[in-house]
Amino acid sequence: MRLESFLAKSRIIDLKSADFEEALGELVGAVPDSFLGGESKKEILKELAERENSMSTYLGNCVCLPHLRLKKLSRKYVFVIGRCPHGLRLGGKEQYSNARMLFLILAQSDEPSYLQVLSSLARILSDDETIAKMVLPMPLKTFQERVFEAFTGTDGLRDKVRRMNRVFLTRAENIARESGCTAVVVMGDTFTNGIRLANYFNGMRVVLVSERRTDADIEEFDEIVSVRSYSRIRMGQLKSAILVGITKGILRENDKVCCIGGIRGSDAIDSIVVFNVGAEFSQFYMKTADALPAGVKPDVVERVIDIATELAVEGREGKPVGSLFIVGDIEKLRPFLKQLVLNPFAGYKPEDRNVLSPFMDETVKEFSLIDGAFVIDGSGTLEVAGALVHTPDFNLKLPGGLGARHAAAYSISLAADCLAFVVSSSTGQLSLFRKGQMVVLSEPRA
């Protein structure tokens, strides 16, 4: 889905008011009446304001992302963006004074891609380089162009591949063809403004792995895998990306892959790696169809990896945090769970506790301090936090030095059809358990 198709320069405006609710009114006022199908702008504004007071949509990084679903909206989505260079006021809440941009999303109430679009927008608007280009003092026309650039990737390096990159790409193509590779993986976060591959890898499947892009317009790429990276180690996100590619059917067991990339943000290719997908993940699955439990969406696995990776690298409030995330059918998992504390997610609408929503990140990270496991259903709904895992006795086959959290993940992955992700509190290493088999997805903290 091309998100820029829901933008229009007439709906990228300068806000006159510093009051949050009045600024929202300006955004709603910029939406053509014909798009609303008779919906009342007054009611839309009221609902947006009530939602903001109950749950903040401030993403950090100078951006607020108010959003609402409407029954009569004539388009799938309508985006309206307002610039507020001096911040906003809302009930004395300090965070809003840091806001420099309001990004309003209106969506059809039955649009199935809603949470995925929210997640995609949050990724784009959380990128420091992207926002830095938007918040500088500039004419409104320039600001509008910068917004479109952020969504279309039309600036800078796309049309200029440095000489050494051309050498590496030529060598990578020769290596890929000589070694019988069936796919090429490009680590997109190596490049600050994208890379052009029009003259390379013709006839081969090319996959982009990137934290910043989920809806790229680069014709060279057949598939896109979006995985966060919190490490400057070369290609540190590769293993998680390959796993997500397997779950989405982008990569298969019999694929041989040529991977090219370099240090994040360096714009320079310095590594070429060839490996067999089946051999790399031989301990994880026998067949591609067996990679995911029944009913689990690949997007959910991708989001859980994102959150778990952030916890693994950053911890919480500067301290290491261990966590266990179990993904699968809640009814099949329930016999093996016992609640240690009152379930903090009980009573909330499924949409409001879904990990695909970008506003759940901080909530999950805060509750990670509670002993026990998070349990997430196949659609991404957080069902339980603070759960004790109790399963039949198994003959544990774990590497030395792993503790109770890893043992719980190992046993629940054998007892039920699920995935179990473990963040080690001592090393920060992220591991995945599937049917009693363990795959390490990230390196230990330095």
Image (cartoon, helix red, strand yellow):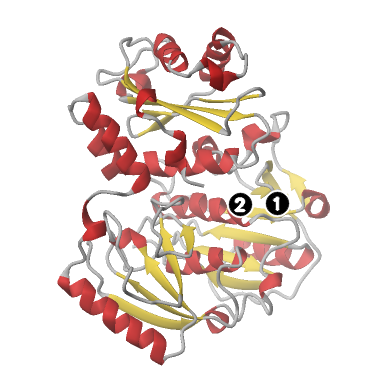
Secondary structure beneath dot 2 equals: helix
Q: Earlier in the sequence, mark 2 or mark 1?
A: 2
For the residues marked 2 and 1, what is the alpha-carbon distance in whole angstroms? 7 Å
Q: Position of residue 327 (x, y in %)?
A: 67, 54
Instruction: Look at the picture and state if 371 lies above or below 346.
Output: below
Mark 2 residue type: Val
Q: Residue at x 66, y 54 (%)?
A: 297
Residue at the far bottom in the pictured view: 178
Disc number placed over residue 378 in the picture, else none:
1
Q: Quadrant of residue 129?
A: top left
Disc number placed over residue 300 in the picture, else none:
2
Q: Residue at x 25, y 21 (%)?
A: 85
Q: Quadrant of residue 192?
A: bottom left
Between 286 and 369, the one nearer to me in the picture: 286
Q: Residue at x 33, y 39 (%)?
A: 148
Q: Residues within 10 Å of mark 2 (few under 14, many from 20)?
A: many
Q: Quadrant of the C terminus?
A: bottom left
Q: Are marks 2 and 1 in contact (CB under 8 Å)?
A: yes
Mark 1 residue type: Gly
Instruction: Look at the picture and state if 309 lies above or below 395.
Output: above
Q: Residues within 10 Å of mark 1 (few under 14, many from 20)?
A: many
Q: Position of residue 101 (x, y in %)?
A: 34, 26
Q: Is residue 205 visible in the rendered structure shown here?
A: yes
Instruction: Look at the picture and state if 64 lies above or below 24.
Output: below
Q: Residue at x 21, y 79 (%)?
A: 167
Q: Position of residue 382 (x, y in %)?
A: 66, 42
